[in-house]
Amino acid sequence: MIKEGIVLGERYEIMSRIGSGGMADVYKARDQKLDRLVAVKVLKPEFREDANFIVKFRKEAQAAAGLAHPNVVNVFDVGEDRGLYYIVMELVEGITLKAYITRKGKLSVKESTSIAIQVSLGLEAAHNRGIVHRDVKPQNIIISTDGKVKLSDFGIAKATNSNTITANVMGSVHYSSPEQVRGGASDARSDIYSLGITMYEMVTGRVPYDGDSTVSVAIKHLQEEMVPPSRYTPDLPYSLEQIILKCTQKNPDRRYQNMGELVEDLKRSLLDPQGNFVNLSPLSAHAQTATMAGSPGQTTRVVQSVRQTDTRQYEDYEEFDGDPDRNGYGGDEDEDEDDAVSSKLEKAITIGGILIGAVIVVILVIVIGNMAGLFNRSSSSSSDSTANSSSISSSSTAEQGIEVPDFRGKTVAEATTEANAMSLGVTQAGTAASDTYAEGQIISQDPEAGTQVDENTTIRVTVSSGPETTMVNVPTGLVGASQSAAEAAITAAGLQVNAELAYSDSVSIGNVISVSPNEGTSVEEGSTVTITVSQGPEETTSTVILRDLRGLDEATARQVLDSSGLNYTSVSGYDNSYNIGDVIAMDPAPGTEVPEGTLVTLTINTEQETSSGEWVCQNTLPQPPGFTGASRITLVLVQGDYTSTFYDGADPWADGGEYTDTIYGQEGVSTGVIYVYIDGAENASYRFDVTFAQENL
């Protein structure tokens, strides 16, 4: 195991191990050159000294490196460093399809079809480059957190145009094609078979062939007919079932011949679920017998092949032993064996046919003889003969039976009316969710349509309860987790995520504070889960209500501001109603609530310098036009850079008169502007243009 922090190829910094396979360990790493996260597959120590394994390990990268497709895990780089052989791949955050099926039991039709289409597109890209995966299974299919389906691990793939003969590699026997478990040559159609088995598992929650050992499972792939998936999923659309059955034909020639054909039918099944458009050619009687029987030699080779693979724990890379027969390249020997089997079967069928024909003739002779009374040793009454004849007639009618109609899509009442007219009955056996049939319509029946049954037989039907509502649980362990980890877990559960921010003194920034609905709650698939994410402690700022400092001397006023945590500055002004050096105005105004650290401007009463006389305003200030009164008025004189707040108090025009107090200006300046501020507003509401003149003392 590689330690964290090691850098491979002077570029890839190992962060942690995220998985392990038969041949290699997989690590999460950071590409220091491109500053991105990647997955690095490193060959295990026990295989680094074997030249054959190293060659095959590199071939894995060569097989996949040329693929650049959104449904394939991309390979970025391959290299060797200090005896470590590694492959650098795209890091996909998500869940394997196997784990997803295990979590949900089985998937919906739309979900299964969407996944199958995306995997097919990835395989089509590989097949177009002459690459066969040879290990398609749910464990090698990843559903990323953004819903993208990606096919991974071309570990036992090889280029189909290669001259190199690989060893007998099987991958997982539950998904292997008959030609793979037989040890024969495989091609793109083998991937189609494995994908068909994967689709079967998605819609039913189980694999079609299972057993106590890998040998028994392999033999079933060769000899047993598959149980139709609709047996386990009664509301499975007809077209999708036919697609699965065509993909999993034992004879490769009867499967889809390329991924393009499969993708076309999968897309069509979404539009026409019950359509009969899948071209599934019927088997001849001889072909069926040959497929089911197999040959002793073939079975022996399968057992040997499977036992070898089972002993080696399905290693991705196996040594080639030089035996062409064992690896499926044995010339005409297999064909000769098959011809011998066929010849023996034809003889057996011929002999069996003769025997069956003889038995039928004997039965007919006995029946006709009984009807004619030829075999009665004693005279029988006519009534006995009549009864015997009547019994035979009744038996013949019963054997003929009544063909069960197709009740799917009808209500129970409609089916009952139709069945009663045919001397049959109908009873409701239960209900089940269905995306295909409306609520109240029949979705399946037992016996199935077309079955021959006796008169007065009761047909058991299952009725639709409406579209399926899949319930999932909100994942646990979200509170305290990082936002990205929580979102990935929620998305993998089939739910939507809504993230909100909030302050928290106890939860670190970026981690989840709470979840709604609560963790473990059962909700409908696709529902939205809201996570509240911490943005750290809230920054709080104390506030201060400004005291009225007017009339205090400047030093005292500054002490008050210091004790309140406020900053201050001062400007000069003049008001003959205050002592020189006192505060005559302040900004912000008294009573204002301000944050600590606010800058307060104090206007300090400053003695006016005079020479031969003071400069006095020559104007009175009438009530401004449109003015309706105010509780507080501030008057400020501006003469160039000189500013003086000479009045800050009650409304001077409250009695409707004029402001007539003496207004002193700057020495030598004959003009100025007086601004009127109402109730402590930041901006002046009115202005007066005034003139000044010097008054002699």
Image (cartoon, rainbow, N blue to C red):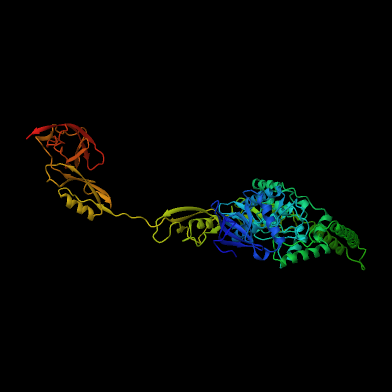
Relative to 376, residue 667 above or below: above
Query: Is residue 138 toward the left or the right of residue 184 in the image?
Result: left
Q: In which quarter of the image is residue 636?
A: top left
Q: State the image quarter where residue 542 is shown.
A: bottom left
Asked if one can make out residue 615 in the rendered structure from this viewpoint, the answer is yes
* Pick the front one: 130 or 362: 130
Residue 479, given in percent of the width and then of the height, sits at 47, 61
- Quarter containing the N terminus: bottom right
- Would residue 428 appear left or right of 665 to someone viewing this image? right
**Could you tell me residue 8's position as x and y percent?**
59, 58
Q: Which of 662 and 406 is in front in this view?
A: 662
Give the total of numbered labels: 0
Q: Nearer the viewer, residue 63 or 227?
A: 63
User: Which residue lies most toward the left here?
Assistant: 697
In this view, 595 is above or below 373? above
Q: Residue at 46% x, 61% y: name it.
A: 480
Residue 559 placement, left or right of 242: left
Image quadrant where one finds the C terminus: top left
**On the picture, is 588 further left or further right than 432?**
left
Does residue 427 appear in this view?
A: no
Q: Where is residue 214 shown, x and y percent of the image?
A: 72, 65
In percent of width and height, residue 259 lies at 70, 48
